[in-house]
Image: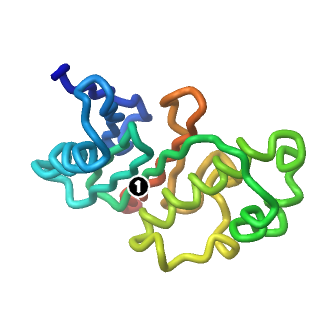
């Protein structure tokens, strides 16, 4: 069996720690990848941990504040998917018509990362959640977001709450 491949993902100072895991060098199946990802964060002293899987890859992140991460493979998206995930302004974005698959996959991925950071990805209706990719300067109040450079043909997003520092 080959050694496990872990790639740290560089993010801004004060941002969560993020790692990309690749199951292929070690010959792990999907269950093995999930166990490996859980093991990466099991010893974390940070209170907030998040994971995302798109076999053969996984992203793991941890932080002292709420955090969410998602990775997706860019694949063809149909009109029904767009209706399920987009707000009206998101459907009006020019990228929606010029690069629909990449745009919709990134949009979904950013919303999934945000909903994980908010606490429960299933609870949030993506049609009512503004995508972090459309936030000015990738910020909304204490919330920060960034696309992650990972694997070609994939998109990944990280969202986290930055601790507020009291005014002096």
| Place of residue 60 in the rendered image (x, y in percent of width and height, measured from the top left) | 32, 45
Write down the residue under mark 1: 162
Q: Which residue is at a point 63% across and 70% down the rendered structure image?
A: 126
Secondary element at tag 1 = loop
Q: Which residue is at a point 53% across and 49% down the rendered structure image?
A: 145
Task: Depth check: give the residue in front, 145 or 92.
Answer: 92
Q: Quadrant of the C terminus?
A: bottom left
Q: Residues within 10 Å of mark 1 (few under 14, many from 20)?
A: some
- Going by the picture, which residue comes out furthest to the top? 2
Q: Which residue is at a point 28% across and 41% down the rendered structure image?
A: 29
Q: Is residue 69 above or below residue 89?
A: above
Q: In this view, does 15 lie above or below 52?
A: above
Q: Quadrant of the rendered structure where residue 102 is?
A: top right
| Place of residue 42 in the rendered image (x, y in percent of width and height, measured from the top left) | 13, 52
Q: How many labels does the image show?
A: 1
Left or right of residue 148, residue 66 in this image: left
Left or right of residue 80, residue 113 in this image: left
Q: Is residue 125 above or below residue 75?
A: below
The image's colour scheme reads rainbow
Q: Quadrant of the N terminus?
A: top left
| Place of residue 3 in the rendered image (x, y in percent of width and height, measured from the top left) | 18, 21
Left or right of residue 47, residue 69 in this image: right
């Amino acid at each position: 069996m080959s050694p496990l491949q872990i790639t740290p993902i560089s993010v801004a100072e004060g941002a969560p720690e993020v790692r990309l895991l690749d199951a292929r060098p070690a010959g792990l199946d999907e269950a093995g990848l999930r166990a490996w990802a859980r093991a990466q964060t099991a010893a974390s002293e940070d209170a907030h941990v998040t994971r995302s899987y798109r076999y053969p890859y996984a992203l793991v992140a941890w932080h002292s504040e709420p955090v969410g991460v998602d990775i997706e493979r860019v694949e063809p998206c149909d009109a029904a998917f767009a209706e399920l995930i987009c707000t009206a302004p998101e459907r009006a974005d020019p990228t929606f018509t010029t690069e629909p698959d990449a745009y919709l996959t990134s949009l979904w991925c950013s919303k999934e990362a945000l909903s994980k950071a908010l606490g429960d990805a299933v609870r949030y209706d993506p049609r009512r959640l503004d995508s972090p990719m459309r936030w000015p300067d990738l910020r909304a109040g204490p919330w920060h977001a960034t696309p992650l450079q990972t694997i070609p043909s994939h998109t990944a997003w990280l969202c986290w709450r930055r601790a507020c520092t009291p005014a002096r």
